[in-house]
Image (tube, rainbow, N blue to C red):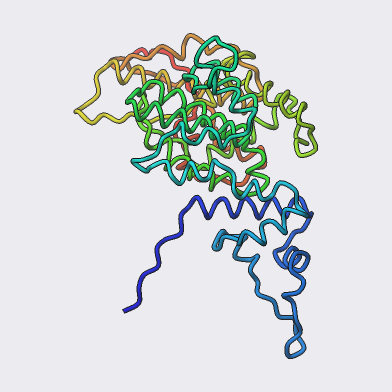
Amino acid sequence: MTKSLKPRNVVDVFRVRYWYTGVMHKLKFETAYQVERKIEPDHFRLQDQRTVYPGKWRRYAVGENTPQKKLVLTVDQQAKGSAYELNHPLWLILKKLSSEKFKATSYIRYLNPTIQSVVMRPQTDQLGAPLAWAPYTNLKAKVLLRRGTLDALAALVLYWHDAKTRNDHPQAEAVATSIYHMLLLIGWDMRSRQLHTGLFSLFRAEIFDKTIWEEGCFAVDNDTFEISICLLHNCFDSNSDKERMKASDWRKEMTRIQELLAGDKGFDIRFAMKPFCLPQWNFGPPSRNEVVQWEIHRRHWAWGWDCLLHNRIGKFPENSIDNVDPDDNWALEREEDIYLRINQLHWNPIPESAAIIQYGRITYCQRSSH
């Protein structure tokens, strides 16, 4: 009887694909054949008047196999930094996150020293006092978001696990929101590697679907996430040539986008880029207040999208958006076809089942006469 193979860990699949795309970019190659010929030329030979080679890099491209340490070090000599991308502490943290023995504080030492300086603080005021993990605050989240790195993302994941372990649901939701924003910040790079969908699916399974959200269950889908990346990084004079940025310029760009997410320039982006949730009433029909509150949240989310899709800066939603009464009959005054608007912006066609299509229509209502 053939023994069934254990499914490959999705984190390993993703990190190998991340490593592969980074190597391809650094060496300016377009195909697995080109990079394999460059890195491992000795593996190519003629046989029956044709070139034969192992084709290992095709499997790396889809994350099917993990490269051995010797090869990783060899590649790193030509593609500097690629070894760190493969062995980044974030991947280890995500793999161990569901373990009962997982302790967040044990992984802080693996993070970049600049990130450690953010999340650690002296235990006492004495000179040379030992450091301890600093509690999560909104200020900590802002500082980490401004870094916009995988190490900063890893720190947020550790904070999320700590809050969830303590059953601090409000804080876990706050951290999960910061994690979602961080994914949007680093999304330009992931999308250029065609890895944004894989990254989002990974974090949805490990973080978002395991978070208890006040407004229901997490409902952002892959398509809505991708459109969010496109708008956040390509509107309001965003620098689209981020690949050539210096570290100092990158931090300035992350600060600028973080201010947009925080609502410092208007509430349109803050509402649109907030994680969207669907109501989840497990204990019977919803109350009048639950219906009203969820619809107001949905309208604020849709208003933010309406502003972004029409390149209009919105400071704060119109008062009519908050006029919701389940007992009244309402006549629609205006309803934009968001599906047509999105496709006018030349993105790949998205299904009408996407959250942005199903729930992103902005409606301004007036009470009907009957």
- Residue occupying the far bottom of the picture: 48
Front one among 84 and 169: 84
Tell me where residue 195 appears, x and y as whole percent.
60, 48
Residue 74 placed where, x, y %?
72, 59
Residue at image point 71% right, 26% down: 251
Q: Nearer the viewer, residue 218 or 247?
A: 247
| Count of numbered labels shown in the rendering | 0
Is 167 placed above or below 57 here? Answer: above
Could you tell me if residue 321 is visible in this image? yes
Taking depth in this image into account, of 14 and 302 the one nearest to the observer is 14
Quadrant where the C terminus is found in the figure: top left
Is 182 left, or right, of 35 in this rendering? Answer: left
Q: Please give left or right for residue 288 compared with residue 361 in the image.
A: left
The spot of residue 95 in percent (x, y) is 46, 46
Instruction: Answer above or below: position of 93 versus 68.
Output: above
Q: Quadrant of the N terminus?
A: bottom left
Q: Is residue 341 visible?
A: no
Residue plotted at (62% across, 28% down): 309
Vertical side of 258 occupied by 348: above or below: below
Viewer-closest of 189 and 64: 64
Residue located 63% across and 18% down the image: 259
Point 52% across, 53% down: residue: 12
Residue 353 in picture, x, y percent from top left: 45, 42
> Which image quadrant for residue 184?
top right
Quadrant in the picture for residue 365: top left
Compared across the picture, whether 239 is left or right of 368 comes to right
Q: Is residue 207 above or below residue 300?
A: below
